[in-house]
């Protein structure tokens, strides 16, 4: 990749990393500061469903953040755009659609 493109990709990935970090922090703060799942407001099935949704969202955000941080590391090491499985170049269209992707379409 050329330097201009690298800078653009880095800027986009860093912005996404910052956005995801903020969401993870906000979610953690909500959990610590009053997001409670006591049985007083709903039946136990609803409480369990809300806990599941909360946990799922937190896990999804952390996975996305991990992918973005891995992409930034790959960019620093000159491996950005290469599939982690086969080492082949990831299609440009795939990278444009999913800048933090780690795998080519064959290994997705």
Image (cartoon, rainbow, N blue to C red):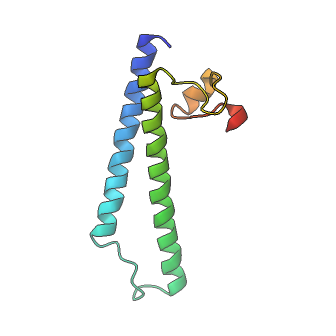
Residue 76 appears at what percent x and percent y?
41, 24
Q: Position of residue 105 (x, y in %)?
A: 69, 32
Q: Total number of numbered labels?
A: 0
Q: Which of 88 and 45 is in front in this view?
A: 88
| Left or right of 17 on screen, residue 63 | right
Q: Where is residue 43 in the image (x, y as percent from the top left)?
A: 50, 87
Compared across the picture, whether 93 is left or right of 54 comes to: right
Residue at 51%, 34% in the rendered image:
100
Observer-nearest of 41 and 75: 75
75 up-or-down from 33: above or below? above
In the displayed structure, 87 sits above or below 48; it is above
Tell me the residue at 36%/51% (across/down): 23
Q: Judge whether 27 appears above or below 67 on screen.
A: below
**Residue at the spot x=49%, y=49% of the render?**
63
Location of the C terminus by quadrant is: top right
Residue projecting furthest to the right = 106
Q: In this view, does 74 lie to the left or right of 19?
A: right
Tell me which residue sits at (37%, 33%) in the image: 14
């Amino acid at each position: 990749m050329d330097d201009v493109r690298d800078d653009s990709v880095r800027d986009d990935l860093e912005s996404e990393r910052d956005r995801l970090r903020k969401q993870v922090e906000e979610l953690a703060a909500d959990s610590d500061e009053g997001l409670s799942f006591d049985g007083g407001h709903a039946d136990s099935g609803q409480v369990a469903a809300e806990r599941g949704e909360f946990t799922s969202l937190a896990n999804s955000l952390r996975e996305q953040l991990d992918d973005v941080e891995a992409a930034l590391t790959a960019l620093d090491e000159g491996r950005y755009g290469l599939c982690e499985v086969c080492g082949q170049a990831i299609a440009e269209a795939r990278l444009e659609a999913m800048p933090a992707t780690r795998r080519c379409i064959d290994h997705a």
